[in-house]
């Protein structure tokens, strides 16, 4: 039973056989050994310098440390001085973290912003200088032309051009070479105009230009050779920003010139090989029907059409028309619904998830990280979703372009904000929500009411940004709720849905009024057409007297207009055209459900709801594990690289939550001081009661803190995982950052508890046990946060430590209770604490240790085994939490 290294004299040991006894020199009494244990036959004791009896071979340096007191007849040392020093150090560190965390982040962001602003200022100055130089050159050219026109009458028009004329042609040629965005016909036109002004006959420009093309080609080649090394040297932050802002200035100049481009210029710009093209995605759907599983309620019915790349399609209709359902069905997010019909992607019957890496989906709710800045939200999406082969300067250019196009320059360094802490405004938050999808350069973009809550100017700004994406071939489909007429004219196509999910119109926006005029529905003057159409579909406004079409007959009229097959139950309205039959058709999907419910009993209705819920859950699980062949051909960053980005993001979030972390540490300090002062470790129980309270307190406080890791950003995770970002990188990165708390919190608690309670075991032994305990309860908290809502998860985090610890401390409980206790983590932690404390007893206290361990049913050799159980329990719950996060996530 002796621990190796105890400072006890060599003596023979004998097995205690029931009545075996030996004399205690300190108390002059006989002590009985327990059966089967090894006990010394005699103990020699030598007095220490302070009057205490110490085992032979020990010294005062081994028992009495500096800054401690060894009072006479005391069982342990007074080491409060060490506790005071450690408490002072930790308190100072917490105060620094609490007060300086924001300053550290702010200083870093300020330095980053200075570098960016300096680069933007430099590029702007160069652009202005280049513009002034171009103006001066045009003035000099105009002056030279005027001078030539004055002298042109003295010379023949057939003479060779002088050097000044050649220089003017050189300037024209170089200008047209620099302006690659202009049409292919413009350089020829400029050269013709310049030659005409110089007096060169038409048709002989090429013969004259050949004389200076050869001399000018060498100069161009040298310029190209000089630019290549500069592009390779783009690696510093300043150079990257200069590259990005210079490209933005060029794009602005190009957009300014594109306003006056001819048709040939547009064709030249579209066929320019230097422009990076995106893959085109076209979605065609035929007889699309969507209904709820289990309840057979129809949400969409017989929707046929096509959305094309390079066009902005608006989906409109009254409330309950199935606009969001239609968008979710096209995006492959209709969970719990039965989708019938045909959906073709680029003319092929493939899953839309095959193009998930180049598809963006903007949800109706603004799901962004509130404790990150606007720029940090955009940058994380760009890093994880853009191609891994794309150079960093190009990524910076994409992010800067989105920030400028959405008008987010003024708030790029501002926190988005949460419910507790106010950040940017609602309209700005809506634009950030859209920007997260724009920075990944999608080929197909779905938006669910992106203009809701925006004013007119913000909506126009957003539509201009989307228009720029459409010019690059992006297929944009968005749900819009009653836009203004100016905004309405910005759309290319319109899908108008009626209640019940029936199509009323699907075609170009420019022809929608013409189509309804053909039906006798004319929009009154000074009335917004989209508002008028929605009011008609709602039944709030009657059509003009010249129209004999009821608003309930509009879906059938559209099917007849396009030649689509009409469902059998709607053919009566197509032939009769009566209002009553139309009403029956329109209400068919709703009255069918009501009639079925009336005929069913209460138990049948409950069973139907349970069945529908089970089917939705099964469909969600199948949908989450659905894997399709990747047809987007975009190689996004690997899991390890995404893990790196996640760690940086979570670390930044934790730094901004440093005050909350400091409060958690302060509560641990107070709990350690209270429990250490109230529960002293004694030699009869080996600190059993003190460690019991420690397990309850540490488990409760660490679980509550760990719940925040996965309960606060569930919506953000669901959005990111649906876009293809790695769930494994998300989970492991959070666990990695939380490992800092796992390592530090035991030190914070023991800094109070250990130096007030003063147990026999060393600080290192207590730290190791407490470290394994915190690792175990953190894994349990992860599972509670993922499987339960915030309220029930907090309640379970409070009750579990108390209930399980009460079960674990039932010494005289029944066999059932003891069997349950063997599977409770407080049993393993408590046994490890007691064994670590008991192993420090030697000499005369060996028999006391044997009796106490026998009473609690502990084995002194099981210390490492109990720690292994705690570690395995923590790892097992982490695996369960990850499986639950991937399986039961919301799509």
Image (cartoon, rainbow, N blue to C red):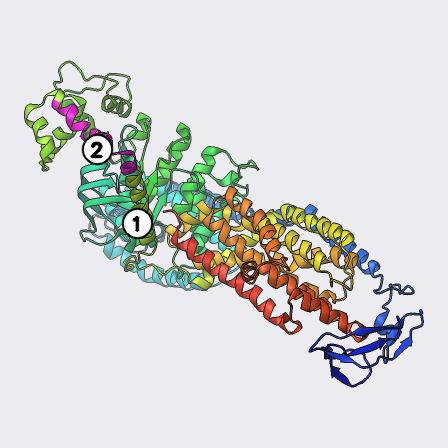
Q: Which residue is mark 1?
A: 619
The circle on residue 390 is: none
Under circle 1, the secondary element is helix
> Residue at the spot x=44%, y=49% of the render?
717
Indicate whether 847 appears above or below 454.
below
Residues drawn in magenta: 581-605
Indicate whether 65 appears above or below 385.
below
Say whether residue 549 is left or right of residue 744.
Answer: left
Res 554 → quadrant = top left
In the rendering, at what x and y percent does residue 489 appear? 28, 30
Indicate whether 316 appears above or below 149.
above
Question: Label 2 vs label 1: CA separation?
Answer: 24 Å
Q: Which residue is mark 2?
A: 596
In the rendering, at what x and y percent does residue 186 appear? 27, 46
Taken as a whole, is the magenta stretch helix, strand or loop? helix
Is residue 29 a member of the stretch shown in magenta? no
């Amino acid at each position: 039973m002796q621990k190796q290294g105890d400072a006890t004299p060599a003596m023979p040991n004998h097995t205690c056989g029931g009545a075996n006894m030996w004399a205690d020199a300190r108390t002059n009494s006989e002590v009985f050994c327990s059966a089967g244990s090894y006990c010394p036959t005699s103990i020699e004791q030598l007095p220490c310098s302070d009057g205490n009896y110490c085992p032979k071979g020990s010294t005062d340096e081994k028992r009495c440390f500096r800054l401690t007191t060894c009072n006479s007849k005391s069982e342990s040392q007074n080491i409060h001085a060490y506790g005071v020093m450690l408490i002072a150090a930790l308190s100072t560190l917490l105060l620094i973290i609490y007060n300086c965390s924001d300053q550290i982040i702010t200083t870093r962001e300020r330095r980053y912003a200075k570098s960016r602003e300096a680069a933007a200022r430099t590029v702007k100055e160069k652009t202005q200088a280049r513009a002034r130089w171009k103006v001066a050159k045009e003035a000099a050219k105009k002056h030279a032309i005027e001078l030539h026109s004055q002298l042109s009458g003295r010379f023949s028009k057939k003479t060779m051009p002088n050097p000044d004329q050649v220089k003017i042609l050189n300037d024209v040629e170089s200008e047209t070479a620099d302006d690659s965005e202009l049409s292919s016909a413009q350089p020829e036109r400029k050269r013709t105009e310049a030659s005409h002004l110089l007096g060169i006959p038409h048709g002989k420009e090429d013969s004259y230009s050949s004389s200076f093309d050869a001399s000018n080609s060498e100069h161009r080649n040298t310029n190209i050779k000089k630019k290549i090394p500069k592009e390779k040297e783009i690696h510093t932050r300043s150079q990257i920003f200069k590259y990005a802002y210079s490209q933005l200035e060029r794009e602005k100049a190009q957009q300014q010139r594109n306003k006056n481009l001819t048709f040939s210029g547009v064709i030249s710009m579209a066929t320019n090989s230097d422009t990076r093209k995106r893959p085109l995605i076209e979605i065609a759907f035929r007889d699309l029907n969507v209904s709820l599983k289990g309840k057979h309620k129809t949400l969409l019915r017989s929707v046929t059409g096509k959305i094309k790349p390079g066009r902005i399609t608006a989906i409109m209709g009254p409330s309950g028309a199935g606009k969001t359902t239609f968008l979710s069905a096209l995006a492959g997010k209709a969970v719990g619904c039965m989708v019938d019909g045909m959906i073709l992607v680029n003319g092929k019957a493939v899953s839309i998830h095959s193009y998930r890496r180049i598809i963006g989906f903007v949800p109706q709710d603004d799901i962004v990280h509130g404790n990150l800045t606007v720029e940090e939200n955009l940058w994380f999406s760009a890093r994880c979703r853009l191609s891994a082969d794309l150079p960093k300067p190009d990524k910076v250019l994409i992010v800067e372009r989105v920030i400028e196009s959405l008008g987010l320059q003024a708030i790029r360094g501002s926190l988005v904000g949460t419910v507790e802490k106010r950040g940017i405004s609602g309209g700005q938050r809506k634009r950030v929500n859209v920007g997260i999808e724009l920075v990944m350069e999608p080929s197909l973009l779905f938006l669910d009411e992106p203009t809701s809550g925006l004013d007119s100017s913000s909506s126009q700004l957003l539509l201009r940004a989307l228009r720029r994406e459409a010019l690059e071939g992006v297929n944009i489909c968005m749900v819009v709720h009653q836009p203004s007429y100016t905004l309405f004219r910005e759309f290319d196509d319109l899908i108008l849905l009626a209640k019940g999910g029936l199509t009323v119109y699907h075609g170009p926006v420019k022809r929608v009024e013409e189509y309804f005029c053909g039906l006798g529905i004319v929009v009154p003057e000074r009335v917004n057409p989209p508002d008028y159409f929605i009011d008609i579909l709602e039944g709030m406004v009657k059509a003009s007297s010249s129209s004999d079409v009821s608003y309930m007959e509009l879906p059938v009229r559209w099917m007849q207009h396009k030649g689509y097959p009409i469902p059998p139950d709607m053919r009566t309205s197509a032939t009769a055209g009566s209002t009553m039959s139309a009403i029956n058709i329109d209400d068919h999907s709703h009255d069918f459900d009501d009639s079925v419910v009336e005929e069913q009993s209460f138990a049948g209705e409950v069973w139907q709801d349970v069945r529908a819920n089970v089917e939705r859950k099964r469909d969600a699980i199948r949908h989450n594990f659905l894997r399709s062949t990747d047809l987007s051909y975009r190689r996004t960053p690997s899991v390890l690289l995404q893990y790196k980005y996640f760690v940086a993001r979570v670390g930044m979030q934790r730094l901004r939550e440093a005050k909350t972390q400091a409060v958690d540490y302060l509560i641990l300090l107070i709990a350690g001081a209270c429990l250490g002062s109230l529960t002293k470790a004694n030699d009869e129980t080996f600190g059993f009661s003190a460690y019991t309270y420690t397990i309850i307190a540490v488990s409760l406080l660490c679980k509550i803190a760990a719940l925040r890791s996965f309960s606060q950003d569930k919506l953000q995770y669901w959005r990111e995982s649906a876009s293809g970002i790695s769930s494994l990188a998300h989970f492991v990165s959070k666990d990695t950052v939380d490992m800092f708390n796992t390592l530090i919190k035991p030190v914070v608690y023991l800094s109070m508890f250990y130096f007030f309670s003063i147990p026999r075991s060393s600080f290192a032994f207590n730290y190791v046990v407490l470290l394994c305990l915190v690792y175990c309860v953190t894994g349990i908290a992860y599972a509670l946060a993922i499987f339960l809502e915030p309220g029930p998860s907090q309640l379970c985090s409070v009750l579990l430590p108390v209930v399980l610890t009460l079960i674990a401390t039932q010494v005289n409980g029944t066999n059932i209770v003891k069997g349950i206790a063997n599977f409770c983590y407080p049993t393993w932690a408590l046994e490890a604490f007691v064994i670590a404390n008991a192993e420090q007893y030697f000499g005369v206290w060996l028999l006391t240790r044997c009796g106490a361990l026998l009473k609690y049913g502990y084995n002194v050799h099981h210390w490492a085994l109990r720690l292994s159980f705690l570690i395995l329990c923590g790892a097992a719950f982490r695996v369960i939490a990850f499986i639950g996060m991937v399986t039961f996530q919301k799509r």
